[in-house]
Amino acid sequence: MGKTKKAEKKKSISYAKWGYIFIIPFFVVYVIFTLYPQMLTIYNSFFEYYRDGLNVIGPNFVGLGNYAKLFSPNTAGYIPIIRFTLNTGILWIIGAVPQFVVAMLLALFFTSTRLNIKGQQFFKTVIYMPNLIMASAFAMLFFALFSQVGPINQLLISTGAIDKAINFLAIKISVRSLIALMNFLMWFGNTTILLMAGIQGIDESLFESARLDGSSSTQVFFHITMPLLMPIFIYVFITSMIGGIQMFDVPQVLTNGKGTPDNTSMTLIMYLNQFLGISKNYGMAGAVSVLLFIITAILSTFVFRTIAGNKK
Amino acid sequence: MKKLLSAILAVLMIVSLAGCTKPVEPTQEEGKVLNLWTWNDEFWGFLTEYYADEKIDEYNVKKGDVTIKRTTYPSDNGAYQDALDAALLNQANAAADEKVDMFLAEADYIIKYTNSDATMDVKSIGVTNFENTYKYTVEAASDAKGVVKGVSFQCCPSALIYRRSIAKAVLGTDDPAEVQAKLNSWELFDAVAADAKAKGYYMVPTPLETYRTFSNNVTSAWVEDGKLNIDANIQAWMVQAEKYMTEGYAPGAFGIWDAEKNDQMFADGKTMCFFGPAWYFNFCMGNAQDPEKGCSGDWAICKGPQAHFWGGTWMLAATGTDNPTMVADIMNTFINNEEVCEKLVREKAQFSNNQKINNALAADASYGSAFLGGQNDVAVFAELAKDIKFQHITPYDQLCNEGIQTYFREFLNGQSTKDQALANFKDFIRTTYPSVVVE
């Protein structure tokens, strides 16, 4: 009896178990450092749990109390978190749109066999470079450059363009533009390289035949490149969007955590961070996190459905 | 990114676990490391010069065979309190040489620590002589039951610091007594501000400069019965600040630590009045003392429209310290060692926390500050120190004071409406202090 079973086993020899064994380390790390904290965050969001001075208050179960607080209007009659959500959206869009346009153009130029640009390696390195700098250092640099006594103001004054220093960090449009510019500079190289990889993955013969058929570059782009690039494009788009929703370091450092002026550059994570400041308010911070999670999930699904759906 | 973070956390966890397993031996002998927590290097400088035997580097000095080690976090946005709280809450688990032995705290939040078990009775470790210290400095460092938890090395009555040359141009005199007579109330101050403007000068470098004079004379605390409360005097400041901006009595609504404000202290500055205690001369008026662009000697002080104090640094003894003797010794040195206290005044332009020394210098006709054109500042401060009352204090004061200035300044700069500025301030408090009810 035993013999036959053994024989059977041998026949359907499976390496699957090795696969599972090899991914165990990842799952262990994932469960301990990602899944467990995530669950804990959701759990904490139902509790009143913070520090008042050196005393720890809670954890006391409050049900949806934290969420109710999050959505209660302030003394000026609006709900702060909605304002901060809009801020986050605006900051992402004004940085991401130019980023995608420029990255797409660059990717097309670099991969075009007709242009055949020399020294690609060099350009790729250069455009990727800003991403290697820490976001906070980058923001600090811009803070210094654009301060009222900084070199940009000095330059503008010495060339006679303005006669009094502009406080760039106190004007809504300039602060938002600076944040968008920094995010653009940091991420367009990364996007370019991903899109290039996507374009290079498309069968060259398709482009050739299209060209032989006499289609224009625009036609090639919209009817061949774009549709075939879609999976990569969706990936890049969604990661950029998630990154945008989690925008923190650049505006935090640039505005010293205050989202100046008038909270117009306060993002959701900066708001979350305020809860985690001196009072270590895990309950409210947890509620903001859960909200972020929901927003991210909805938007990602939506984007995925619309773009991917169109393709099919 | 997430993975990297997890890896770092993993390493940190292992390190901290390793830290925990080290047995904390209850020694008779005192520790070889004294950990001092600060938010800047002001006191550290005095300690290095007047107490330590040998300077090792910017963060370590030696006294006998004990290394005094400094841990510093910036005060902004409560970062110092934040880090300190974490360390104090972990005090019981920390290894002896890692424990906080002594930390500094400011008037704005000292009550949070004195009213907790994280600090201990300094009388129990040998700081008993408070004969010469200013009463308010002892009250400020005492808990609700009157147990003294720390001492201050300075006393911080704040004065009106004015430019002699501009006072002459505006008021026709630079004599402190006469200037005081002309600026004795806010009404007079406002009238002179208009005068100064007419003559091409600014009254203050920023409307925020007068904030402390108002906030220090409140009749109710920032938090009353658990609710955020904006005192009438804070509101009076807001009215004044708005007026000074619209009337152009200040060059701009700068922050009190901003470079633009400090530029007004150069010789070519156009501002007449600043407000600050003795520590302000060295800590904030570097531009005025600049040998080339500054105007040392062109300054003088008087009481100003309203008596007040600003700041002050207290040394608190942390519960669980393994260096109680040295902690007490440092405290005693800076309040009772007459030689050190006198040096603080003469060499560091401090107003010491030793009345005997201060009064002696106040009465000394030969003593005068070159920076203030020979004026005996100690005499002025000694008089002002009598009026200091440490009252209407809450643990939430630092960020309430910081917050109202930050957000109201946005209004002054035209970045938001007044209502919006107040709403932003209230949102900030609501987010920062969940225990405070904001209506």
Image (tube, rainbow, N blue to C red):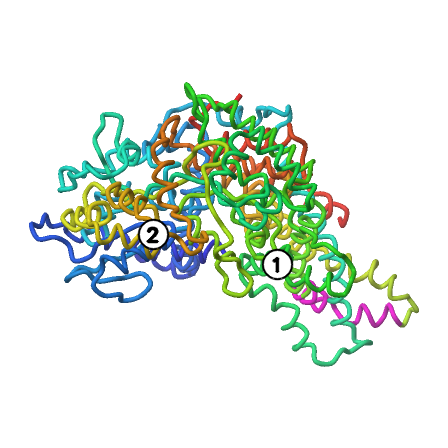
- Asked if one can make out residue A1 in the rendered structure from this viewpoint, the answer is no
Q: Which residues are magenta?
A: A193-211
Residues B42 and B121: in front is B42
Q: Is residue A141 visible?
A: yes
Helix, strand or loop under label 2: loop
- Report the magenta stretch's main SS: helix
Chain on which label 2 sits = B
Q: Which mark is residue A142?
A: 1
Residue B7 is a magenta residue:
no
B419 left or right of A213 in image: left
Q: Are marks 1 and 2 on the same chain?
A: no
What percent of the width, then of the height, locates residue A143?
60, 56
Residue occupying the point 66% across, 61% down: A185
The chain letter under disc 1 is: A
Q: Read off the residue under disc 2.
A: B367
Near-viewer residue (A139 or B132):
B132
Left or right: A49, with A180 as reference point = left
Q: Residues within 10 Å of mark 2 (few under 14, many from 20)?
A: some
Location of residue B313 (image quadrant): top left
Residue drawn 73% across and 59% down? A229
